[in-house]
Amino acid sequence: MLMDSVKVGFKKGIETTWMLAKVIVPVYFIITFLQYTPVIDWIAETFRPIMALFNLPGEAAIILVLGNVLNLYAAVGAMSVIQLSTLEITTIAIMLSFSHSLLIETAVTKKLGIGVTKVVLIRVGLAVATGIVFGRVGMLL
């Protein structure tokens, strides 16, 4: 009985690791590759004014877009490549806790008959509001 549980648990662990690796590893390599091109610098410079609202560097826009459009694992893959402070990582994590996987979760919301626009506005609004508050409070620490 115990060995069966261990075998099932091991198999599930391998399956989960493979599922996560299929998202995180490609994002990690793509972002790493892009760092050797002007693309990351262009994104950082373009989004620097917006990200400054949250006390984040411009590169954080990539992480937020990946987390909102794809999923949290894509954001983690990008976050592991970009140099961020503990405060910046925490701010991004708090923001994404409200607004991650918007496309998938919006589809689920729609199937449940809940107003999609209202849900997206609430989730993104909470992410922005908490990002601003936490970014500002973090600056004081």
Image (cartoon, rainbow, N blue to C red):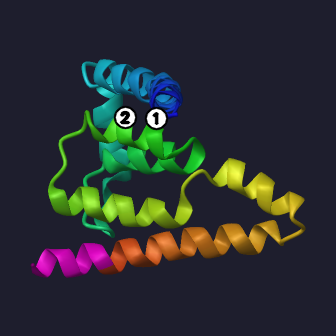
* 90 left or right of 115 in image: left
Q: Badge 1 local density, few (<14 within 10 Å), some, or many (20+)?
A: few
Is residue 137 magenta-colored? Answer: yes
Q: Is residue 78 above or below residue 88?
A: above
Residue segment shown in magenta: 134-141
Look at label 1 and name its amino acid. Leu
Look at label 2 and name its amino acid. Gly
Is 137 in front, or is 14?
Answer: 14
Our reading of the magenta stretch's main secondary structure is helix
Q: Secondary structure at mark 2?
A: helix
Query: Which numbered circle lies on residue 45?
Result: none
Q: Position of residue 122 (x, y in %)?
A: 63, 76
Q: Position of residue 127 (x, y in %)?
A: 48, 70
Q: Quadrant of residue 81?
A: top left
Q: Which residue is mark 2?
A: 77
Which circle's residue, 2 or 1, is located before the other in the chain?
A: 1
Q: Which residue is mark 1?
A: 2
Q: Quadrant of residue 29?
A: top left
Is residue 116 magenta-colored? Answer: no
* 139 left or right of 113 in image: left
Q: Secondary structure at mark 1?
A: helix
Asked if labels 1 and 2 touch by Cβ distance under 8 angstroms, the answer is no
Q: Position of residue 93 (x, y in %)?
A: 36, 59
Q: Quadrant of residue 89?
A: bottom left
